Image (cartoon, rainbow, N blue to C red):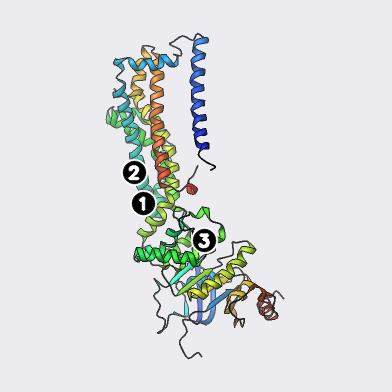
Amino acid sequence: MNGTREPIQRYALAALSHLLLIAAWHFFVIFGEVPKFVMPSPYETVRALLVPNYRWAENIAVTAVEIFGGYILAVVIGIVIALFFSWSRWLEMVAMPLLVSLNMIPKVALGPLIIVWFKYGIGPNIMMAFAICFFPIVLTTARGLREVEPDLLDLVRTLKGSRWQVFTKIQLPGALPYIFSGMKVAAILAVAGAIVGEFLGSDRGLGYLMLQVQVTLDTAAMFMAVILITLIGVVLYGMVLGLERLLVVRDARIQ
Amino acid sequence: MPMEEPFIHLAGVRKVYRTRGTDFLAVSEVTFDVEAGELVSLVGPSGCGKTTLLKLLAGLHPHDSGTLRIGSTTQPFDPSRDIGMVFQQPLLLKWRRVIDNVLLPAEILGLPATESRSRARDLLALVGLKGFEDKYPYELSGGMQQRAAIARALIHNPKLILMDEPFGALDALTREKMNLELLRIWSEARKTIVFVTHGISEAVFLGTRVIVLTAGPARMADNFYVELPHPRTLDMKTHEVFGEYTRRVYRLMGME
């Protein structure tokens, strides 16, 4: 709160810790004389980008589409379902326990089935990302929509306000902090979902590439792929945080 | 009988809540009139049906028997536009700035935006929040939030303000200050106010009239005018008359 120095300092410290980790990695490989196929140095890892055969750009694009596609689908469908729950208690009592049971299924175990049903490729991987990150969004949104002060509803009722007014002016903005807390958890899960999908069956994407280079023991390329997958996740998470900062008043944010 | 019709008229009002086959008598045999422009205190112990009575007046629940009428030929009453409510908690929307919180009832009623906004500014000045229009609720103290809630209750210019223990959550000093503020706002805004409280001294200090309710089953035990001059000042609390009024209420609650 005091001045502008503090945030700059914080970013500088964050950058420093990351640089320290890379430096530690570098010196560990150099002085430990670790063989390249066990652990490449940071420099060798970056050099993996120069192998044209690996078609980095295309693979990054495919994985990003899977992650973002599954994630956006989960956010939209998750919020809509939670909305229906808030409108019908009966529907919630019927469907919520079912969703909880379905959520107990390890989604990864569904992978072989998804391949049988839908072949492999981007579509099924989007489904895997969706399946893995959809539930937290339903749960937090439903909770957020339910959290309305009864006295506040009375206030609107004395003014003969409509259900739609309650929803747009009180319920939805009040639920936003909950929705975002679900979206943050889901962002991390979506990345895992897409990669698992690629491991199980695919012909493109960074997860697929990792399986290919595993055969030739190109560990540097594997490292690079992991870093790129992480970066896609960081970009997604950063976008969600940015959107939250834009839409949710500071005091209302759920950490 | 008064010559003119009173603004609010209750006669033998009774309310029973039914839950799982058992009846709970929340309000029984309540009879009183309120003239336009009065500040009436409804005082009683917890669970005496004060809040229920307020909800009946707000039209949030139907009553079971008796007469409950608001409005008169000289003071017509529109139930969807003429009620302003203040609760124990300020219940401000934390994602809205103070002025936008005040504007909520105006938005719901679809009142013209520009006029409402300038009226909201005037009201915030009236409740002593000039300069805080663009703050968020978390930047305000509890007393200031409650002032904003009072401005919100006034934005659509209702004839009747219903207050349910509005200062119950404040510390004692802030509460006294808010009592004086409420009297000032009341004398400037010229509204009829029904003020529910369990503070006996607060009820006597604020009310032009005090209505006493007793618990289980909720009944009206007393209804008297407070013959203290306006504007009221804190030192009136030490007057002999003030003590007589409060003792009268204490006695009815079996505390003396």
Query: Of all residues shown, which one is farthest toward the right?
Result: B256
Q: Say whether residue A69 is left or right of residue B190.
A: left
Distance of mark 3 from mark 2, alpha carbons?
Answer: 33 Å
Give the secondary structure at mark 3: loop
Q: Chain of mark 1?
A: A
- Residue B135 is situated, as x and y percent measured from the top left of the image, at 48, 54
* Residue sitting nearer the eye, B89 or A101: B89
Residue at mark 1 shares a chain with residue at mark 3: no
Give the secondary structure at mark 2: helix
Rendered residue at 36%/59% (across/down): A165
Q: What residue is disc 1 on?
A: A84
Task: Name the amino acid type tagged 1.
Answer: Phe
Quick one: label 1 or label 2, which is nearer the N terminus? 2
Task: Give the label, 3 or 2, closer to the camera.
Answer: 3
Task: Give the label, 1 or 2, closer to the camera.
Answer: 2
Task: Name the amino acid type tagged 2.
Answer: Val
- Residue A211 is situated, as x and y percent measured from the top left of the image, at 36, 18
Give the secondary structure at mark 1: helix
